Amino acid sequence: MFAEFETFIRERTDLSDADIEVIRSLAIEKIVRKKESLLHAGEVCRYKMFVSKGLLRTFCTKEDGSDYILQFSPENSWTTDPESFDKLIPSVCNIDALEYSEVIMWTKEDFNYLFANIPGLKAYTQKLIVQNMYVVRQRVLSVISSTPEEKYDEFIKNYPNVFARVPLHMVASYLGVSTKTLSRIRHAQLVR
Amino acid sequence: MFAEFETFIRERTDLSDADIEVIRSLAIEKIVRKKESLLHAGEVCRYKMFVSKGLLRTFCTKEDGSDYILQFSPENSWTTDPESFDKLIPSVCNIDALEYSEVIMWTKEDFNYLFANIPGLKAYTQKLIVQNMYVVRQRVLSVISSTPEEKYDEFIKNYPNVFARVPLHMVASYLGVSTKTLSRIRHAQLVR
DNA sequence: GGAAAGAGAGGACATTTGACGCGATTTTTA
DNA sequence: TAAAAATCGCGTCAAATGTCCTCTCTTTCC
């Protein structure tokens, strides 16, 4: 499980063997079965997580029970609830597994230690945050400016790997449109 | 103009007088009249900007000429096109002034210099990026999960200072709804 | 292996939303 | 100060979207 992470991080940084070893020593490996939860709304998100295998989803539930997906996290991606994790406040989101998954976790305390002692990790993390900002800004633009069909097409284009693995109603939930609308779009695209 | 910035930054950091002086020496002060542009789509966004007075808007224009507002930047806030600024690639957004404004700008080169030499500024900037992430994530959630009326009410609650200063159609453009919809919401709220 | 749950299409209908245009008022600008 | 532009509400109509439902097929889970 850690092997995938090691490959991943070595490709993106120039951490030494010793660095990797420290990171490993503080890592918590966790197997998550499908539908199992990693974070419930109301709890503090105590871990920064790396998905080495599988697929997670971060979502919020409104009062009426409807879900809205903030993020999909397939293998080789990071996830957490940043605000809850940073400030140690209760999260408003849930994180659960859409597939059997393998996750590596670090507590805030341990991650701060790594952050302070491994400059390469710090630099990498900061670059990651910035890149994530580009993506989220683009998503805001898309969601306020695109038609449902454009959003659907963009999703398939940007996340083919996720699209192929999640039910359609979750794509709808991510895009902020109803399943009916997506169903209509697909029908129209078939006929076309 | 720089005085406002100095007050602002001193409140949020513990920079020394010498630090401030270096920052000042690299700052470019700029007066922007209403409707004047600071960035056109297609250009590289060469500056990180602090608004010391006035109100800016960052927006994208689609092929059909419609605008979508990504961000309002009132006095005491920062703005730039992060992706264009970081990677020196052409921007897809425009930035212009909704009011007479006073802006302080730094080039990437100069900002990097400050970044490398003033740890307090670096720490502050990184905290800012992270906080911005919370806000943008919240916006994504709102825009995919809230009704137009909820979005409108949230906007007034979160940005009363902006709301009071911009025409309604810009609020609509920021929220991703039509002016007609906002008009209807206001009518309904009056009657209620 | 069989029951239960999940997924997705699609019909019917109501509601929401948007596009367009008009007119009144305010603000801007020359 | 007068003309031009911007703002905003509103009416009408058409289109888009959502809710609720049923039906079928697939997947999951004892």
Image (tube, coloured by chain):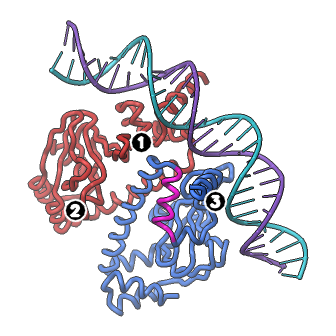
Chain colours: A blue, B red, C cyan, D purple
Amino acid type shown at disc 3 = His
**Residue holding disc 3:** A169
Q: Are marks 1 and 2 on the same chain?
A: yes
* Location of residue A37 in the rendering, given as x and y in whole percent from the top left corner: 64, 71
Q: Residue furthest front?
A: A192
Looking at the image, residue C27 sits to the left or right of residue D24; the answer is: left
| Mark 2–mark 3 distance (CA, rounded to whole Å) | 38 Å
Q: Which residues are magenta?
A: A148-160
Q: Are marks 2 and 3 on the same chain?
A: no
Quarter of the image holding residue D4?
Answer: top left
Residue A152 drawn in magenta: yes
Q: Nearer the viewer, residue A95 or B98?
A: B98
Q: Chain of mark 2?
A: B
| Secondary structure, magenta segment, majority class | helix
Q: Which residue is mark 1?
A: B174
Element type where label 3 sits in the image:
helix
Q: Is residue A128 visible?
A: yes
In-image side of A59 versus A9 (left or right)? right
The residue that disc 2 covers is B88
Nearer mark to the viewer, of 1 and 3: 3
Secondary structure beneath label 1: helix
